[in-house]
Image (tube, rainbow, N blue to C red):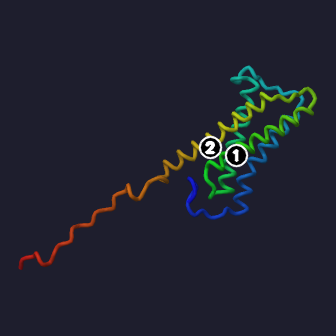
């Protein structure tokens, strides 16, 4: 077993992989559609950090979806590898989104948006890890057999010590 990967995992089926990545693709389509609009009617005054806060939230959700899909697709990989890949993929989506916005009328590309996207990616992946931790803790995943005392058997009577 390497790192904190799960022991002896079976490879996921194609159906499981498709089901895991479908929300990611759907969310990316939503981001693309919203980025294609010249103006968005979102009341930014209600969102903390305004535009950057919206980017953080948007890419935190994407990071959470990506880390979940990667865990399903590569169950035997160590979590750190999954996390780094999830953050990198999410940030790459942010780069593509910013380049796309540079070509949309009345929209602009901003490096500070990329920073907010990266912060969101890290928060989303961290949230995914926290959810996994809580789930495993509740399910008893980390219960060690050494920590669980076996049921004690009743003492065996010695037949030679019996008086007749």
Q: Quadrant of residue 156?
A: bottom left
Image quadrant containing the N terminus: bottom right
Pick whichever of labels 1 and 2 is earlier in the sequence.
Answer: 1
Q: Is the Cβ of the residue at disc 1 closer than 8 Å to that at disc 2?
A: yes
As displayed, is residue 123 above or below residue 106?
below
The residue carrying mark 1 is 86
Find residue 82 and report its horizontal and vertical position in percent.
66, 49
Disc assigned to residue 128: 2
> Farthest residue in the left direction?
164
* Residue at (67, 47) in percent of width and height: 67
Image quadrant containing the C terminus: bottom left
Q: Residues within 10 Å of mark 2 (few under 14, many from 20)?
A: many
Disc assigned to residue 63: none
Find residue 129 and report its horizontal and vertical position in percent.
59, 44
As displayed, is residue 8 above or below residue 58?
below
* Residue at (23, 67) in percent of width and height: 154
Q: Quadrant of residue 150?
A: bottom left
> Farthest residue in the top direction?
45
As displayed, is residue 140 above or below residue 37?
below
As displayed, is residue 136 above or below residue 100?
below
Q: Nearer the viewer, residue 19 or 125?
A: 125
| Residue mark closest to the camera, 1 vs 2 | 1
Q: Secondary structure at mark 1?
A: helix
Find residue 110 and report its horizontal and vertical position in percent.
82, 28
> How far apart are the alpha carbons under marks 1 and 2?
10 Å
* Residue at (69, 35) in percent of width and height: 120
* Residue at (16, 75) in percent of width and height: 158
The reply, left or right, for residue 48 in relation to residue 164 is right
Find residue 28 and report its horizontal and vertical position in percent.
79, 43
């Amino acid at each position: 077993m390497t790192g904190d990967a799960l022991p002896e995992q079976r490879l996921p089926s194609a159906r499981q992989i498709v089901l895991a990545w479908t929300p990611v693709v759907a969310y990316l389509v939503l981001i693309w559609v919203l980025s294609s609009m010249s103006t968005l009617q979102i009341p930014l005054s209600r969102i903390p950090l305004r535009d950057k806060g919206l980017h953080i939230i948007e890419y935190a959700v994407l990071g959470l979806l990506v880390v979940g899909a990667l865990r399903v697709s590569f169950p035997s990989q160590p979590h750190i590898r999954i996390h780094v890949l999830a953050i990198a993929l999410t940030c790459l989506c942010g780069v593509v989104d910013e380049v796309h916005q540079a070509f949309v009328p009345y929209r602009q590309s901003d490096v500070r948006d990329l920073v907010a996207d990266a912060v969101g990616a890290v928060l989303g992946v961290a949230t995914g890890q926290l959810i996994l931790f809580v789930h495993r803790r509740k399910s008893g995943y980390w219960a060690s057999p050494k920590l669980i005392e076996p049921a004690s058997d009743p003492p065996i009577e010695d037949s030679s010590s019996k008086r007749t």
